[in-house]
Amino acid sequence: MSLLRMAGLAIVLVISLLFAVFVGDQGPWYFSWVIGTVMIILISGAGAILLDAQMDSSSEKEV
Amino acid sequence: MDLINPTVVDLSRFQFALTALYHFMFVPLTLGLTFMLAAMETVYVVTGRKIYKEMAQFWGKLFGINFAIGVATGITMEFEFGTNWSMYSRFFGDMFGTPLAIEGLMAFFMESTFVGLMFFGWDRLSKQAHLAVTYLVALGSNLSALWILIANASMNVPEGAHFDPDTMRMQFDSFVHVVFNPDAQSKFVHTSVAGYVSAALFVMGISAFYILRGQHKQFAARSFRMAALFGIISTVAVITLGDVLGRMDYEKQPTKIAAIEGLWHTSKPPYEPWILAALPDDAKQENHFEIGVPFVLTPLITHDFNTPITGLHELEDAAGPRIQSGIEAVSALRRYGETHQQADLDVFQAHEADMGFGFLATRHAPGQDVTTLSAEALPQVIEATKPDILPNVFVTFWAFRLMVFLALYFFALFAISSYVSLKNRLERNRLLLRLCLWSIPLPILATEFGWITAEAGRQPWTVFNRLPTFLSASTHSVSYMLFSLAGFAVLYSIFIAAELYLMFKFARLGPEAHDTPQTAPDHLHLGGAASTPAAAH
């Protein structure tokens, strides 16, 4: 199962690299949109998880 | 050549502007909310905390209302190209139709299918599969926008196509060139990310409303935090990407960039100020007053300190030879259509790049026919045509400024909101919360101003430098146009009223009233002033 997962991730990695090489060359702003959107989602999600951590470690109920 | 009634052209333009601006009230929220939902659901899948599922479901319901009305208002626009802009469709249909058809497939097949799965699949799909569906909805809605913007960009910067003198229409050379048109790229990223800003302020504003009322505090605090961070990065991106779009206009549409900057005369680098406010007078071709910041315009537009930016007067003067060359192109095209002689085709091809300027001159030629112009009449027609190459400076100038001023306001608002949220001090900053609430419509307004800048600045062309707007409309009667315009205005106003009613209703009800198919245990329920951090688990 873990071998299959590894193989799956490897395929995703190869596709991502091909995408980066091709689209990064032909369509740099399309590529920046993909990277930027992923970054925006991750930072936004990290902010929420940080809030959970802040709430868990604090006795204050203020938001 | 009989010209289309100018009143019909103006009414066609007004109708398209009206329907497009109505439609675009819904689009930005769809573009941005889908990725916000994906972000919330990602946190749910990663952490397993049900509050994030409730968030995705509640904001998803508001997204659903917006999505349905957005699709309905968009469909009519696709038909308008055929009904009101048949000359344009005849000339440019090959180029415009393909991306439009792909957009239809994206919107109706991919997006709609996965939207159904997203709404009704919470109990039927695994967490991971549902998350994948949500991402596909986000991707589908943004790819829909991509194809529309590719179509729009091909009108602004017609690359990957040529004019065929036998069929009298623009034809595809390269699909890849059309898709990767630099104008399409910069337009798409700028527009899509502007949608993220709209969605972030929408979520932040409604969350602020709950915090102000002391309701659903844990839910609202998390939504606010995610939206603030989503918004601050998006705002930085939308400003940066706006600069990219400005560079594109500087290179490909100099009249638009000069109109945006209210630049009547070629700039004097490096001192030339960036005009903050002015009163451009299109009739007198001057600004009545100006307040500017010196040394800013040149680096802002050209990214260096030495390159002058051509002003509107100089662009107008430079159009003279192109108008004359265009008249020769149109005359050769007419002859070629009658004789099919290679010599006429050679003359046409020598002047083909200026063909649009020849079409532009038809309005001023005796009998609206530039092919029979006498040598005496030619200079007069050229002089009369030259001012036509300029867009409306007042509208373009102010639409751009209002968009920019709003973007800077969003940056400040998101920056302060992110800081206050990260410090968990939202409840103490009631003024900020009120500001967030009342700012909800502003990003929509900013995107509307953006479109007015782009489309008013493109005039007098539907296909830049190829086909003038006054030759693009259909030959309807004025009464037909007035009747259909009134119909659209009434119908779309009903749509807006329905959207606002439903949005207000469900936003006021809040997440507690959300009909969750898989009800969380009692201790997981959100909300009310009594909610505690533990309730989020």
Image (tube, coloured by chain):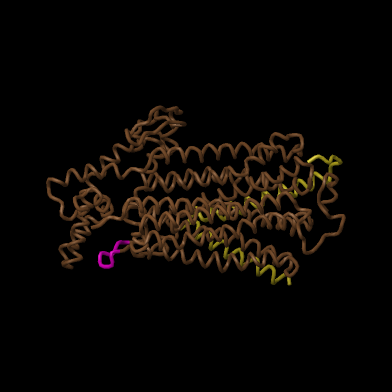
Colour of chain B in the image: brown
Q: In the drawing, does residue B228 fall left or right of residue A15? A: right
Image height of B102 relative to B281, above or below: below
Above or below — where is B194 with respect to A15?
Answer: above
Q: Position of residue B329 (x, y in %)?
A: 21, 56
Horizontal relation, residue A3 to residue B7: left or right = right
Q: Quadrant of the N terminus of chain B?
A: bottom left
> Would you say B528 lies left or right of B166 here?
right
The quarter holding residue B63 reads bottom right
Residue closer to the observer: B345 or B435: B435
Q: Residue visible at 66% across and 52% down? A: B503
Q: Does the magenta stretch include residue A52?
A: no
Instruction: Work out whether residue B237 or residue B447 is closer to the camera in this orientation and state it.
Output: B447
Q: In the rendered structure, which segment of residues is drawn in magenta?
A: B162-168
What tint does the image give chain A?
Answer: yellow
Percent across and percent down for residue B330 are 22, 57
Q: In this view, does B416 lie above or below B253?
A: above
Q: Nearer the viewer, residue B100 or B265?
A: B100
Horizontal and vertical percent position of residue B172: 36, 65
Query: What is the quadrant of residue B413 in the picture?
Result: top right
**x and y percent of residue B185 in the render?**
47, 54
Q: Does the magenta stretch include residue B167?
A: yes
- Is B446 placed above or below B3 here? above
Number of numbered discs visible in the structure rendering: 0
Quadrant in which residue B60 is drawn: bottom right
Residue positioned 74% across, 38% down in the render: B426
